[in-house]
Amino acid sequence: MHVTMDMDKTRRPKEAFFKAAHLNDTNSMKALLMSEDFDPCIRGDLEETILHTALFNGNKEMAEFILDRIPALIDEPMTCDKYRGNCPLIISGLVINSE
């Protein structure tokens, strides 16, 4: 499923990155990653990265896409209380085991 989001520069808050990761929208993610205002260290409400978001939603294709462009995210742990210290590999294991 590919749903291309509105890429208007005035509407490009960090939520756009997480929405693209959640929806497995590689077209929007590619445009966002190539934008000047991209910060690879952005974190969501649970202190997750865009890679964590893709994995939590079982979006393997998106996770691979993100890792191809930002390989350092593989080592980034979550820092919220509930998931403190969980790196993306642990999250992917949790998702696989819950299916």
Image: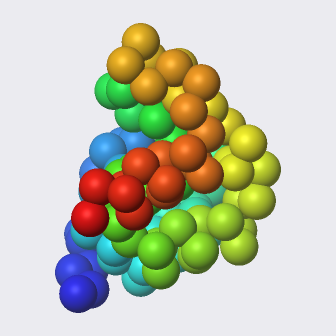
Residue placed furthest toward the bottom: 1
In the rendered structure, the answer to whether residue 20 lies left or right of residue 63 reads left
- Look at the image and tell me in which quarter the C terminus lies: bottom left
Rendered location of residue 90, percent (x, y): 55, 45
Question: Looking at the picture, does residue 21 appear above or below residue 53?
Answer: below
- The residue at 71%/73% (across/down) is 68
Residue placed furthest toward the right: 72
Pick the residue in front: 78 or 49: 78
Rendered location of residue 20, percent (x, y): 34, 64
Residue placed furthest toward the top: 81
Question: Looking at the picture, does residue 47 appear above or below residue 24?
Answer: above
In the rendered image, which quarter is residue 25 located in?
Answer: bottom left
Rendered location of residue 7, percent (x, y): 33, 68
- Look at the image and tell me in which quarter the N terminus lies: bottom left
Q: How many marks?
A: 0
- The residue at 62%/32% (across/down) is 77
In the rendered structure, the answer to whether residue 13 lies left or right of residue 35 reads left
Pick the residue in front: 98 or 36: 98
- The residue at 59%/74% (across/down) is 64
Pick the residue in front: 19 or 60: 60
Pick the residue in front: 74 or 29: 74
In the rendered structure, the answer to whether residue 44 lies left or right of residue 72 reads left
Residue 24 visible in the current orientation: yes
